Structures are given as structure tokens and as C-alpha cells.
């Protein structure tokens, strides 16, 4: 089945012919630009948006991947939009509108016909207001159109030998903060430092949700017991307190997408 979907993906990309890929540096968009790079008669460029709420690790990894596979890559700097400073429930919708308008502008200036992104078939089942914005802006999602799920993309990326095949899902830092909360750069810095530290300690994919001065750590499956029994647990807690958190907690449900979403908070 994935092979048929892969052929469909190739057909979609070839029909588009000329396009800009909104490239986050994650698994899905990485697989998409790699696949596009293998096709003839396709003109495209990967564009990454850099804002204060995008983890620097993602920017570094997007540069590294593009360089490794010799893919044309552009980074566009965008200041923190005032419209989402208070982290509204419609944050993702507003953000997508603002950021992709910059990509649309880039495409227009550089003669590309379409804009595409890395949305996969599974994303349709989650609370994702940003998808509505993409639809309104006529942004194409070839992976979703081909019916490719996250699991299938991961398997295809592994078969292709891509180093990102097992990369955990990532999202902007605003998703770590409750809705309707004023955001400042200090908060974003604390979250990013905490997650980078945990990554370096052997906990990739870990989220650090911020609730005032409380850090709520969400680990991916299998890492909860590892963290609890980690000989360096005291130093981990100490570091998070050093950078500004007063309390450090471990969420026993573990990492799950959208744990700050309204529906999840009502469970």
C-alpha cells in the first residue's frame, strides 16, 4: 500500500511542477523535499520560517538536511506577530495565515506556481486550526493528498536511508504554554533551554509545558521510568530550577500531541 501511495505522491509533485515547500525541518517536510529532489522536471525550493517561537534546533537541522541532500533552501526571518502575543485559541490559524503569506510573497517574487506543506493524512484527525488557514490560502499538502500516514512516512524515510526517519514530532514553542496567556521572550527561552537540556541528556521528543513557574515534563513512551530512575535526575531538576522554574513535575500520561488543546484540558 505505501508503494502505491508513493507513486501517487510522485504524480502529485510532477503535476505541480513548480512549487515552494514550507519546510519545518521535521520528518514529514524533510521526506517531502527529499522525494521531490528525486524527480525530474520539478522545480522547487524549501523555505523555512524563523521566528522567536521556532526552536533553534529546528533551524539548525533544516539547514543541515538541506545541505546534506543538496536542496535549495531559504530561511525567512519573521518577527513575533503581535496578533498571537496572548496565545489565543486560534493561534495556529492566525500564525499560519501570517507566516504562509510570507511564503506566498516569496513564491510570487521568484516565479513559483504553488505552495505546499508537509501535512500528512493523520493530521486531519487532530485539533489543527492551522489546516483551515492553509485551505483558505490554497496551500497544497501532497503527503495528505496521497493518503500517507505518519507511520508510513517514517517507514518510507527509513527505507530511503534518511537520518531523520526516527525524528520525534516537533512543534513551535507556543504549544508549551496555555492558551490566553501573554507570551514574552523569557518564557520561550526557558522552555527551549529546558528541552535542549533534556535532549542532550538522552530524552529526545520531550515536551516541557509551562504553567506559570511550574514545568510539566512530558516524555515519549518508555522514557518516564527512565527519567524517574535517572542517576542525574537531581541535576536535571536543578538545571530547570536554575533557568527559572520553581517547581518541576513529571506528567504520568507522557507526551501526547495537543495536550494544551481545549478538548484535552477538559478530559
Image (spheres, grey):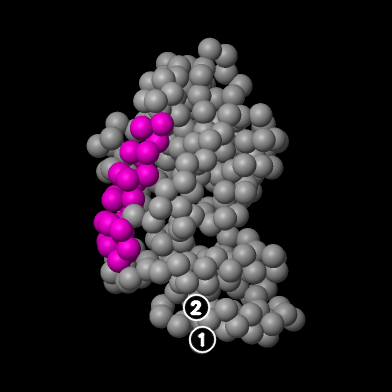
Q: How would you rate the neighbour count of disc 2 (Cα within 10 Å): few for under 14, some for 14-19, many for 20 or more?
A: many
Q: Residue at x 58, y 60 (%)?
A: 205
Give the residues drawn in magenta, as a range: 82-106
Q: Which residue is drawn at 64% across and 69% down?
A: 197
Residue 218: x, y in percent? 52, 70
Residue 19: x, y in percent? 44, 24
Could you tell me how far apart the alpha carbons at marks 1 and 2 are, in whole angstroms?
6 Å
Q: Is residue 31 above or below residue 259?
A: above
Of callouts 1 and 2, which one flags the residue occurring earlier in the amino acid sequence?
2
| Count of residue discs | 2
Q: Quadrant of the C terminus?
A: bottom left
Q: Can residue 252 be seen in this view?
A: no
**Mark 2, secondary structure of its residue:** strand
Q: Is residue 142 above or below residue 179?
A: above
In the picture of the structure, the residue carrying the numbered disc 1 is 247
Nearest the eye: 213 or 120: 213
Q: Which residue is drawn at 62% across and 65% down?
A: 196
In the picture of the structure, the residue carrying the numbered disc 2 is 215
Q: In this view, does 157 lie to the left or right of 256?
A: right
Amino acid at each position: 500500500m505505501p508503494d502505491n501511495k508513493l507513486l501517487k505522491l510522485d504524480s502529485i509533485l510532477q503535476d505541480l511542477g513548480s512549487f515552494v515547500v514550507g519546510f519545518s525541518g521535521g520528518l514529514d517536510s524533510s521526506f517531502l523535499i527529499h522525494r521531490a529532489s528525486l524527480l525530474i522536471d520539478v522545480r522547487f525550493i524549501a523555505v523555512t520560517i524563523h521566528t522567536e517561537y521556532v526552536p533553534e534546533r529546528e533551524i539548525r537541522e533544516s539547514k543541515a538536511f538541506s545541505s546534506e541532500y543538496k536542496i535549495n533552501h531559504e530561511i525567512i526571518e519573521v518577527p513575533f506577530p503581535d496578533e498571537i502575543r496572548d496565545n489565543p485559541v486560534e493561534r495556529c490559524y492566525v500564525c499560519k495565515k501570517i507566516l504562509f503569506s510570507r511564503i506566498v510573497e516569496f513564491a510570487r517574487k521568484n516565479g513559483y506556481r504553488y505552495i505546499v506543506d508537509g501535512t500528512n493524512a493523520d493530521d486531519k484527525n487532530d485539533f489543527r486550526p492551522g489546516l483551515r488557514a492553509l485551505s483558505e490560502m490554497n496551500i497544497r499538502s501532497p503527503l495528505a493528498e496521497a493518503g500517507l500516514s505518519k507511520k508510513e512516512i517514517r517507514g518510507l524515510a527509513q527505507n530511503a536511508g534518511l537520518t531523520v526517519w526516527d525524528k520525534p514530532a516537533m512543534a513551535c514553542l507556543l504549544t508549551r504554554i496555555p492558551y490566553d496567556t501573554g507570551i514574552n521572550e523569557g518564557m520561550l527561552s526557558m522552555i527551549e533551554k529546558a528541552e535542549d537540556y533534556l535532549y542532550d541528556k538522552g530524552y529526545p521528543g520531550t515536551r516541557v509545558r509551562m504553567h506559570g513557574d511550574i514545568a510539566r515534563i512530558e516524555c515519549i513512551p518508555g522514557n518516564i521510568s527512565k527519567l524517574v530512575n535517572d542517576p542525574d535526575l537531581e541535576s536535571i531538576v536543578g538545571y530547570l530550577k536554575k533557568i527559572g522554574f520553581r517547581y518541576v513535575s513529571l506528567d504520568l500520561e507522557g507526551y501526547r500531541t495537543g495536550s494544551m488543546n481545549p478538548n484535552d484540558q477538559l478530559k
